[in-house]
Amino acid sequence: MEFQVRSGMELIPRAECLALLESQHVGRLGFLVGDQPMVLPVNYGLEGGVIVFRTGEGAKLDAARGNKVAFEVDDLDADACSGWSVVVQGVAEDITDLDNWFAERLRAVAGPPCVPGVADHFVRIAPSHISGRRLPADPRSKNVRRMVLPSWVPGDPSARSPA
């Protein structure tokens, strides 16, 4: 087991990162829209270490297609202060019209999206880099008191100010 000295988090080996990616079905796609970062959830499949998801025409497809993206999957337990996170970096490629056996296999594992609407494009992310971190359970976590934030929203005249 290798740990990051500064954070105390366990570094997850690549093979385990792939197994963790395979254990989930929803991840977060990070990309740029113009000069602004955007992160959106997507259903995905994994085949041969390649991530594939379905999407429709629009900003996500336009911004991601042919560009560097990040993809993150995690499983966290807030009560135990433990969990893991895997981040994949690579280039998103629209494989909707590719005619080869691997593209066909990827399209088959993509699965249906959870959101309604047309999702007739298949996008793959071939990883250029995969990293994972695990936060071990903190035995003191049972004694941690969670902060409760007020429901006050600045600028909302119907809400009472916390002052």
Image (cartoon, rainbow, N blue to C red):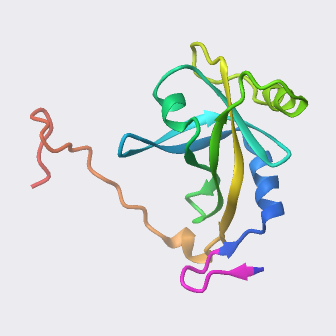
Q: Main secondary structure of the magenta part?
A: loop
Q: Is residue 35 magenta?
A: no
- The image quarter in which residue 56 lies: top right
Residue segment shown in magenta:
2-9
Q: Position of residue 16 (x, y in %)?
A: 81, 61
Closer to the camera in the image, 57 or 153: 57
Q: Which residue lies at the image location 9% right of the left edge and 34% below the top edge? A: 157
- Please tell me which residue is depicted at 35% across the width and 45% down the height of the picture: 35
Residue 48 image offset from top left, x and y in percent: 86, 46
Question: Looking at the rendering, in which quadrant would you find the N terminus?
Answer: bottom right
* Drawn side of residue 110 relative to residue 149, left or right: right
**Number of dots carrying numbers:** 0
Which part of the image, by quadrant, shows the C terminus?
bottom left
**x, y (%) of residue 29?**
56, 42
Is residue 5 shown above or below 83? below
Residue 101 position, x and y percent, is: 90, 29
Q: Is residue 158 above or below residue 36?
A: above
Tell me if 32 is positioned left or right of 20 in this view: left
Query: For the point 71% across and 52% down, which residue is it?
Result: 127
Residue 78, located in which quarter of the rendered image? bottom right
